[in-house]
Each structure stands twice: as structure tokens, then as C-alpha cells.
Image (tube, helix red, strand yellow):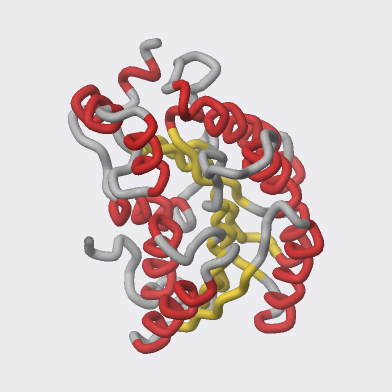
């Protein structure tokens, strides 16, 4: 897909995209880097994949570094921002893309710790590096954003509930962000074809993704959704701080 951001439009900007060694995060980071931003490729345990993306972006003329961090570990998050401060002195764009909760072998409360507690901790830790005019983007799904009014697949429920809890907790910080001149946008999308979440849902509930696709008419793919996230990092903040991507008819009429 063509980059929605103009070449050079983010020259001098510094961006962190969490969970960006692959998928939506990687494509979002690529769009930002192609537009001139210096980008942190963040990963939890896939260093080789993150370094490969950095090499690709640098070879194309961009500026990027890879920094590993476990977002559920405050000490690890602190080290992430210490490195960013040492390398660049601050941040202009924070894309909160990393999420989870469907992985096997994790503690029962892992989804809530990652999708709510870690997101609030991440933003709190980032605040000293964010200056007036900077932008925070929180990435979620319609299934999570509308979970209070629209039921979702049982297999996705822990993720949806925890993602909405994270969104609500972050929204409580909007007055503080606005006082500091920092913009905040939630980007919510329908199920995205080609993501790990979609793969896991299809594995747990065969036919679930195709059924959602039939109901919505079409589903965005990874690069299309990443383009919307990249735009949310630069376009005016909506009045309700929410950018809805893809079909929402089933959710708004529930």
C-alpha cells in the first residue's frame, strides 16, 4: 500500500511504536520512518526480527533503532525510555500498539496486566519525554472498544475486556495530557486479516474471521490498518478522541 504520509513530512520527529517487530506495528513504524521520523522498533523477545526491520528501514534511508522491553515490567519500561532519552532526548509520537492475552502459558491476569496496567505505566513513563505538540495513539479493536454494548466471541472476551479497561484508564489521563499540550487518539478497527489475533481466533473458533468478514463486507488488512494508525499520529484529534476504522454498523446499532 502507498504510504499515506507525505515524504519528509515527519522530518525531525521521534517515534516509538510498541510491539513493532512485525505485523501492524512494523507497518506503522515503516510508514512513519518513510515520512522522515526516527523510529524505535520495540519488541519483547524477537530481537532478530526487530533488527532485520531496522536494517531494512536504514537501508531505505530512514532512521531507526531496536529496543527490547517487557511492557509488564516497570524496570524494563524505565530502561526503554532511558535509552530513548540518551539516543534522542525525547519523543514526538507514541503509538501504543502492543497488546495480547490469547497466548498460551500466561498467567490468568496477563491480559489485564498487559492491556490495562502496562499501558498506563507506559504512558506515565513516557510523559517526561513528550513535549507540547506531541501525539499519543492507542490501538484497539471494535470488539474491545464496544464491549460494553456489543458481545464478542468468547475466545476474545478476556482481551476485549482488558483492552477496554486500558482505554478507559488512558482516557482518564486526557485532561492531564491536554494541559501539557499532548494529543491523544484511540484508533479502533474491526478484526484485521493477517494478524496473530485473527489467526489465534480462527484456530480457536474455525470460521470466526470469515463470518465477521461476511458481516462487515470486508476486513482491513495489516498494511491498510497501519496506514490509519500512521494518519492518527499526525491528523487533527477528533472531538471524541476516537478514530473508527472499517465497518461499525453492527456495533453502533447494538
Q: Nearer the viewer, residue 109 or 130?
A: 109
Percent from the top left, x then y, of residue 242?
A: 49, 36
Q: In which quarter of the image is the N terminus?
A: bottom left
Q: Is residue 69 above or below residue 157?
A: below
> At 37% across and 67% down in the image, what residue appears?
31
Q: In this view, does 224 lie above or below 153?
A: below
Q: Nearer the viewer, residue 62 or 71?
A: 71
Q: In this view, does 21 lie above or below 254?
A: below
> At 54% across and 56% down in the image, what residue appears?
95
Q: In which quarter of the image is residue 117?
A: top right
How many numbered markers are drawn?
Answer: 0
Tell me if I can see residue 239 in this picture: yes
Percent from the top left, x then y, of residue 226?
A: 37, 54
Q: Quadrant of residue 55?
A: bottom left
Determine the residue located farthest toward the right in the rendered image: 75
Q: Quadrant of the C terminus?
A: top left
Q: In this view, does 173 lie above or below 230?
A: above
Q: Is residue 71 left or right of residue 79?
A: left
Q: In which quarter of the image is residue 45?
A: bottom right
Percent from the top left, x then y, of residue 232?
A: 45, 51
> At 40% across and 48% down in the image, what residue appears?
196
Percent from the top left, x then y, of residue 126?
A: 72, 60
> At 61% across and 74% down in the image, what residue appears?
67
Amino acid at each position: 500500500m502507498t504510504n499515506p504520509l507525505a515524504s519528509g513530512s515527519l522530518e525531525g520527529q521521534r517515534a516509538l511504536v510498541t510491539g513493532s517487530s512485525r505485523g501492524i506495528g512494523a507497518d506503522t513504524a515503516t510508514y512513519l520512518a518513510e515520512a522522515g521520523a526516527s523510529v524505535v522498533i520495540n519488541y519483547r523477545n524477537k530481537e532478530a526480527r526487530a533488527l532485520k526491520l531496522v536494517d531494512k528501514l536504514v537501508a531505505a534511508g530512514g532512521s531507526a533503532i531496536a529496543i527490547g522491553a517487557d511492557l509488564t515490567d516497570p524496570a524494563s519500561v524505565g530502561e526503554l525510555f532511558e535509552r530513548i532519552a540518551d539516543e534522542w532526548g525525547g519523543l514526538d509520537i507514541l503509538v501504543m500498539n502492543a497488546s495480547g492475552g490469547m497466548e498460551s502459558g500466561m498467567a490468568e491476569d496477563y491480559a489485564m496486566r498487559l492491556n490495562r496496567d502496562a499501558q498506563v505505566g507506559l504512558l506515565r513513563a513516557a510523559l517526561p519525554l513528550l513535549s507540547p505538540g506531541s501525539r499519543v495513539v492507542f490501538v484497539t479493536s471494535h470488539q474491545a472498544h464496544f464491549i460494553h454494548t456489543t458481545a464478542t466471541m468468547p475466545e476474545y472476551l478476556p482481551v476485549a475486556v482488558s483492552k477496554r479497561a486500558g482505554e478507559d484508564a488512558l482516557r482518564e489521563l486526557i485532561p492531564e495530557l491536554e494541559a501539557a499540550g499532548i494529543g491523544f487518539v484511540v484508533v479502533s478497527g474491526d478484526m484485521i486479516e493477517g494478524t496473530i489475533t485473527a489467526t489465534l481466533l480462527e484456530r480457536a473458533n474455525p470460521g470466526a474471521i470469515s463470518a465477521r468478514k461476511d458481516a462487515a463486507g470486508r476486513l482491513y488488512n495489516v498494511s491498510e490498518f497501519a496506514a490509519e494508525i500512521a494518519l492518527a499520529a499526525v491528523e487533527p484529534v477528533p472531538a471524541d478522541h476516537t478514530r473508527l476504522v472499517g465497518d461499525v454498523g453492527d456495533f453502533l446499532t447494538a
